[in-house]
Amino acid sequence: MSNPMKYLVIHCTATPEGRELSSKEIRAWHTNPVSQGGRGWKQVGYTDMVHLDGRVERLVDNNEDANVDPWEVTNGAAGFNSISRHIVYVGGCDKTMKPKDTRTAAQREALKRYVQDFHRRFPQIRIVGHHQLNPGKACPSFDVPAWLREIGIRQ
């Protein structure tokens, strides 16, 4: 049974600026058993990942409609996963692991295109940063509402 999608949630990988990350690594962090250093989740936390070079990689199949089917659920924001799609950019921390907007020019452009296209197709779905759903988190290390206004999205 699918649920109507209510949120597109923007995340960062919380990794140091300039360090690329593979989908294999992020999948292992999320789905490996806790005994092997993972979180033991059934599914990776994000549908799509924006690499440093701006390439957007699909991590979980998606039928691109306005519903979240059980097979599309990713584990990006506790309490919101069955009604959300999650996108993550690689980075989000400085070299000392403090939160920092580390998006490269290519990531900024790719994320902008992704979000604008998503909003055009699904204007009823709210676009938020992870920290807006789970206060106390810095993720995605930038002010999503201010950025949305900058790129011409009013919610």
Image: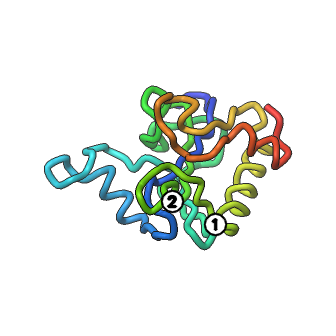
> As rendered, which of 61 and 86 lies closer to the eye?
86
Residue 137 location in percent, x, y? 47, 36
Name above or below for residue 68 compared with residue 110: above
How did the renderer colour the structure? Answer: rainbow
- Residue at left 35%, top 64%? 25
- Outermost residue to the front: 96
Image coords of residue 89 (percent x, y) = 55, 57
Left or right placement of residue 84 versus residue 70 in this view: right
- Residue at figure coordinates x 69%, y 32% from the top left: 126
The residue drawn where x is 60% and y is 64% is 56
Residue farthest toward the right in the current orientation of the protein: 152
Q: Nearer the viewer, residue 39 or 134?
A: 134
- Residue situated furthest left in the rendering: 35
Q: Counting other residues with Cα less than 10 Å from the Cα at mark 1, is it few (<14), some (14-19), or many (20 or more)?
A: some
The correct choice, above or below, for 12 with respect to 132 in the image is below
The residue that disc 1 covers is: 104
Mark 2 in CB contact with mark 1 (< 8 angstroms): yes
The residue labelled by disc 2 is: 91
Residue 1 appears in the rendering: no
Q: CA distance from mark 2 to mark 1?
A: 9 Å
Q: Earlier in the sequence, mark 2 or mark 1?
A: 2
Task: Tell me where residue 87 appears, x and y as whole percent.
Answer: 56, 50
